Structures are given as C-alpha cells and as structure tokens.
Image (tube, helix red, strand yellow):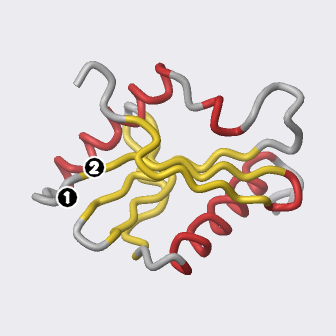
C-alpha cells in the first residue's frame, strides 16, 4: 500500500487537483502521465481548438523558490521532447501550448497559460 504522504502520492493528488481545476475552467482532459524515454507530460488537455501540455509543480514552501521557477530550460526541453513523442503517437493538426499549474501550500493554484515556447524553436 502506498504511503499517502509519499512524494508519489502527493504528486498524484496535486495532478488530480490541477486536472479538476482546469476542467472547471473549461478544458477537457485527454491524457494523464504520458511517459516516454524523454520524460513525462503530467496532463494533456484540450482547450477549444488547442492541445495543451500541462506541467504540474507543487512546493510545500517557497524556501527554495516558487513551483513555477522549477520549470527551467532543461525541464522545458524534456517536456518539449515528451510532447513531440505524444504527437507522434497521437497525431494532431491543432496548435499546441505549454502551461504550468503551480500549486503552493493550502492548494493555492496559479495557472500560467503559454508558460514557455519550444526552446530554440
């Protein structure tokens, strides 16, 4: 049985919270935890005529920076590679964007639409 306080369980809980929040904003959940050798996409959502790749970040405190600050250049590159893999498996002609859902203590949510573009693209 998984410890409810384990990092994996907390991560799953925050991803579920983010998905519910985005769905309440009108997005459609298409996939969770798309994994490949390049990394993982936490959530794939549909927003009208756009495919949205969502990175969910949680920090219990701001002691080491905000959750959104952890999506650095290297993380962005891995997310872009994983998104390219997703598109190979699920071809789409829709425009794509990368969003970040930053969650802080007491489940304060900050949704950053179009948080970054493809590095070097």
Residue bearing mark 1: 90
**Which numbered disc covers residue 31?**
none
The residue most toward the left is 93
Residue 82's image quarter? top left
Q: Residue at x 39, y 65 (%)?
A: 45
Q: Position of residue 2 (x, y in %)?
A: 81, 59
Q: Residue at x 88, y 60 (%)?
A: 106
Return the residue nearer the eye: 41 or 115.
115
User: Mark 1 falls on what kind of element?
Assistant: loop
Residue 79's image quarter? top left
Image marks 2 and 1: residues in contact by CB distance under 8 Å: yes
Residue 49's image quarter? bottom left
Relative to 96, residue 24 above or below: below
Q: Position of residue 65 (x, y in %)?
A: 78, 28
Left or right for 110, reference 107: left
Left or right for 6, reference 115: right
User: Mark 2 falls on what kind of element?
Assistant: helix
Which quadrant would the C terminus be assigned to in this image?
top left
Residue bearing mark 2: 86
Q: Residues within 10 Å of mark 1 (few under 14, many from 20)?
A: few
Left or right for 104, reference 25: right
Q: Position of residue 74 (x, y in %)?
A: 48, 20
Q: Residue at x 19, y 58 (%)?
A: 90
Relative to 6, residue 16 above or below: below
């Amino acid at each position: 049985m998984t410890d409810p306080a384990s990092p994996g369980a907390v991560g799953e809980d925050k991803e579920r919270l983010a998905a519910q929040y985005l769905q309440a904003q009108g997005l459609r959940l298409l996939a969770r935890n798309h994994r490949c050798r390049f990394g993982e996409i936490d959530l794939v959502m549909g927003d009208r005529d756009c495919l949205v790749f969502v990175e969910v970040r949680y920090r219990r405190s701001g002691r080491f920076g905000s959750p959104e600050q952890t999506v650095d250049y290297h993380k962005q590159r891995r997310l872009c590679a994983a998104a390219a893999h997703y598109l190979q498996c699920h071809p789409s002609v829709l425009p794509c964007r990368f969003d970040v859902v930053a969650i802080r203590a007491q489940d304060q949510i900050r949704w950053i639409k179009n948080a970054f573009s493809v590095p070097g693209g």
